[in-house]
Amino acid sequence: MKKVFCLFILCISMLSFAQSKAPFTGKRDFNILEGYSGTGTPAYYVDVKKNGDVYFGFVQVNQASGEETKEEINAGKYNPKVMKVHFKTYNETFFVKFDKEKIYMTDEKGNISKSEDCCSVSETESGSCVCDSAFYQ
């Protein structure tokens, strides 16, 4: 009975590990929200390490002064449901989830957000768009 229980626990552990494996490793750029300020739109990226650690960062260049602002944070191990991103530079917090092709802005529970801030110029008439972005390499 002990062996069956141990085998059962091992199978559950392997299954939960397989579900939380990151969809890729390496750095990918993305742009979920359209920029409106004169200080330059931040260029966001996600960098997934081989050990499953996920780093988010941004680089922003002020168009007037040429000053560069950047920050990178460790958001923890990959979580397919939702990940919290908090940048201290601008006290900015948001939630995302991502797969191999796209990244999605979500609420705290992982529900994909819709907002007019996520619309491209050609979509502004629809009023509310899915907050997502393809990855760029």
Image (spheres, rainbow, N blue to C red):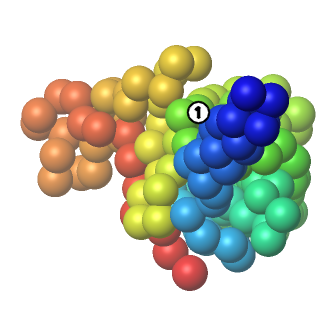
Q: Which of 23/42 is in front?
A: 23
The image quadrant of residue 87 is top right
Residue drawn where x is 41% and y is 66% of the image? 101
Residue drawn where x is 18% and y is 28% of the image? 127
Q: Position of residue 39 (x, y in %)?
A: 67, 51
Looking at the rendering, in which quadrant would you find the N terminus?
Answer: top right
Task: Reply above or below: 54 against 92.
Answer: below
Tell which residue pokes out farthest to the front in this image.
1
Within-10-Å neighbours for mark 1: few <14, some 14–19, many 20+: many
Residue drawn where x is 71% and y is 42% of the image? 7
Q: Which residue is mark 1?
A: 82
Looking at the rendering, in which quadrant would you find the C terminus?
Answer: bottom right
4 sits left or right of 122 in the view: right
Residue drawn where x is 80% and y is 67% of the image? 49
Q: Position of residue 51 (x, y in %)?
A: 84, 64
7 sits left or right of 68 in the view: left
